[in-house]
Image (spheres, rainbow, N blue to C red):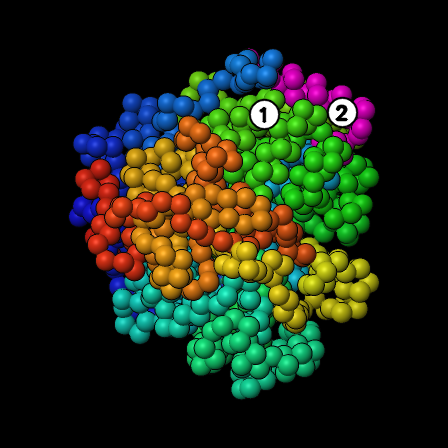
Amino acid sequence: MGRIDRIAEPWGTRTPYGRGEPWPARVDTMLDDGLVPDDVDRWVQSATILHSNGDGLDIAVKDDRIVGVRGRVQDRVNHGRLGPKDLYGWQANHSPDRLTRPLVRKDGELVEASWDEAMGRVVGRAQELLAEQGPSALGFYTSGQLFLEEYYTLGVVAHGGIGTNHVDGNTRLCTATAAAALKESFGCDGQPGSYTDVDHAEVIALFGHNMAETQSVLWARILDRLAGPNPPAVVCVDPRETPVARAATVHLAPRPGTNVALMNGLLHEIVVAHDWVDHDYVGRHTVGYEELAERLKDFPVERAAEICDVPADDLREAARLIGTTDHLLSTVLQGFYQSHQATAAAVQVNNVHLLRGMLGRPGCGVLQMNGQPTAENTRECGADGDLAGFRNWSNDAHVADLARVWNLDPMQIPHYSPPTHAMQMFRYAEDGSLRLLWVQATNPAVSLPELGRIRSILAQERLFLVVQDVFLTETAQLADVVLPAATWGEKTGTFTNVDRTVHLSEKAVDPPGEARADLDIFVDFAHRMGLQDKDGAPLVRWHDPESAFEAWKECSRGRPCDYTGLTYDRLRGGSGIQWPCTEEHPDGTERLYADGKFFAAPDYCESYGRDLVTGAPLEPTEYAAMNPEGRGVLKFAEYLVPHETPSEEFPLQLVTGRTLYHFHTRTKTGRVPQLQAAAPDVWVEVSAHDAAALGLEEGDLTEVSTPRGAVRAKVRVGGIRPGVVFLPFHYGYWDTDGGHAPDGTARAANELTLTDWDPCSKQPIFKTAAAAVRKVAPGGGVPAPAPTTTGSAPVTAGVPATVGGRAAEVDEDLTTEPPGRRR
Ligand SMILES: Nc1nc2c(c(=O)[nH]1)N[C@H]1C(S)=C(S)[C@@H](COP(=O)(O)OP(=O)(O)OC[C@H]3O[C@@H](n4cnc5c(=O)[nH]c(N)nc54)[C@H](O)[C@@H]3O)O[C@H]1N2
Ligand SMILES: Nc1nc2c(c(=O)[nH]1)N[C@H]1C(S)=C(S)[C@@H](COP(=O)(O)OP(=O)(O)OC[C@H]3O[C@@H](n4cnc5c(=O)[nH]c(N)nc54)[C@H](O)[C@@H]3O)O[C@H]1N2
Ligand SMILES: [Mo]
């Protein structure tokens, strides 16, 4: 047992292991100051909630209060490890400014109200609008942070009960491209790979993914392989010198927005220049090879090198690593997804795996990553617009089948057009056709692009805004009704991580005041609205998490995400379990597509695919003609230049993203002392080259501007490619006293981003905009408030290292046996 400051050392102590060996255990424990494990009254099973990795943990409870967390050694995902946000983040549950009573707007002010009054207002307005305008006046904007049972209920209520097509989640900003890319290549959402692929991989390629900071326990697994015998080669594609880039065998730092060119260059090497193609696999299991190979001829590596401004030899070396290994694991995230050709680029990574037959075997996987802890469930349950159970909205038989499960007439489930995506919902609210917007567990007033516009949409008199949250966020402050929610640790439910591992998260303590579980709020709404099935019985027939889970299982039966073999009891005590989990596969399924069979048959697939350039959906007949046997689909994409390119006035490229210590709009991590101190305020990363050209030094105050607005941030001279600047998007206004005024107090990165999205996935573009940076005041030798332990590490000497001190010390136990199950 050792004590270690996990702010200073985010990935903890190394436990090296060799290829094909089990990943050793390391149990991380953080308890309130002065407590030891023996003081704990009970440990309550759960998993991590501040990213998508799904690390199993137990919540420590003493005197009916959460007092800490401990990693679950028996969990297949983390073998006991936890990341910094998880070790310290639970303290936010105790914040004195939690919402504890509903609020309603009276004479312009939000005042406390009873649940009856608050729900009465929501139901009253919903019924008025249904009578006046019909279901399309109502929209639901949900999250990737609720539980499966909650999304399923919301999907039934919104699609089936209300009958609106305007249902989406913040997953649109997050993993819409993961889903879209999986649908394009494999006919259906669902992660092919498994985290255990890290144990077997010879090459690991990370595409626009700063895993070290965003899935830090998965990165610890890779670091442990790198520290062991026969380590894997790592390929990193990222314009910043992230910790991943620093550990990489080859780091490609392309111009932002050039991912498709880069991928085409790599694919040219693999297909055209060297024929590193598994022709047997391609011939038996894919369609589209001839066209792809033909189109790639026009994309020699020199062309890619020029567009991306990356050395051609580095591209060749990356292609050689990827093209010659027998065990390739790829991961893809926001550097690819939040871009103008998001789906097109992510699909090219799938192409690599199809071309090389690298799917469904240990060490051969693609992880089209999720970001949020429960984003997978938003998608599965159809709370993001898709239909529940990965059913295909343009396949009438699927709609009829869902209607059977819900006991509704198929015509009651809207499927006349693609489900409305979030950016379009905000457009409808702006136009005035969408009149009631119910926002749950997301903070669009900080996280959507072009915040000036978003604030004006949300603040409109004619829009009835309902916000269901844990805190009075920037968004909640604009609401007509605020509903106080219980959160993780205060309610029970299940959720599913990136590699399809389902975890149960049990209620450890009561929520504060009158706060209620999101599930209870949805069920209450359904009853108050009198929503019924076609026989006049209540549409929502469940009343608690477990009965909701059982209902969902029936909905998932026979679909790719089949949960029928799972129960709450089976999820208790041991490890999380990967779907599909059925009677035939009671221990779950480690990898999809082991036999080269995809969920892509025309009558089974979730989507018929889209045109990668225009986003136009394919007709059922077009798809059936292209892919009659339901094979993997190889699709070429031509490179297109980003929509906003640098100009004389805005000569730089702005990318936005994350830091290790904060989660999104910091509603939780900003209230946690160790995390907040590690990254207390916004900064802007500038390369040494640009800093010199602009006369900037570490710590100088600057104004960063784009055609949409300006923010102020202190300079971190860091390892980012010249011509590119980076802003973390975590800093909004709830903990400032001024707030987003045009007087120079604005600091949210999204003041600067543009209203634009990928044509296929409709995911907004947060990673390319033209920007300018100018000095406002010298820093006087005080460094920027940016961590030194991360991708924002300084290149200048003399910046003190980020540490957490005694308050950040946690226990690491390296003596426990690793889990034996399902290796
Ligand atoms: N600490 C922390 N962890 C998190 C979260 C958090 O808020 N904080 N959020 C969770 C969520 S919801 C998500 S979605 C994930 C996101 O996880 P990531 O995608 O890893 O995080 P980002 O910082 O958004 O972006 C990753 C990288 O993309 C690079 N990039 C920018 N433009 C380009 C480009 O054009 N091409 C390429 N190849 N790369 C580019 C950036 O330099 C950045 O380092 O993290 C999850 N985990
Ligand atoms: N510029 C820029 N913008 C981005 C991104 C970027 O990289 N750059 N990334 C995008 C991505 S990937 C994402 S995922 C989004 C994230 O953006 P948001 O979804 O806005 O981020 P959060 O701050 O996590 O908001 C979640 C809210 O849910 C509340 N909450 C937590 N638990 C519960 C619960 O159990 N019930 C209820 N009702 N509420 C709860 C929290 O208090 C918080 O207000 O941001 C997107 N915006
Ligand atoms: Mo995300």
Residue 637 pos. (x, y %): 65, 69
| Residue 129, numbered circle | 2
Kindly state the secondary structure of the residue where label 1 is placed. loop
Tell me: 68 left or right of 531.
left
Q: Is 454 placed above or below 476 here?
A: below
Amino acid on which disc 2 is placed: Leu
Q: Which residue is mark 1?
A: 479
Image height check: is 673 above or below 277? above
Q: Over which residues does the magenta segment extend?
A: 114-138
Q: Residue at x 37, y 26 (%)?
A: 95
Question: Residue 655 at what x, y percent from top left?
Answer: 49, 55
Q: Quadrant of the C terminus?
A: bottom left
**Residue found at x 74% / y 32%:** 432
Label 1: few (<14), some or many (≥20) within 10 Å? many
* Front residue (pair 393, 75): 393
Residue 786 in view (yes/no)? no
Residue appearing at x 34%, y 65% in the figure: 246
- Above or below, 480 against 504 in this view is above
- The main secondary structure of the magenta stretch is helix
Q: Residue furthest bottom?
A: 274
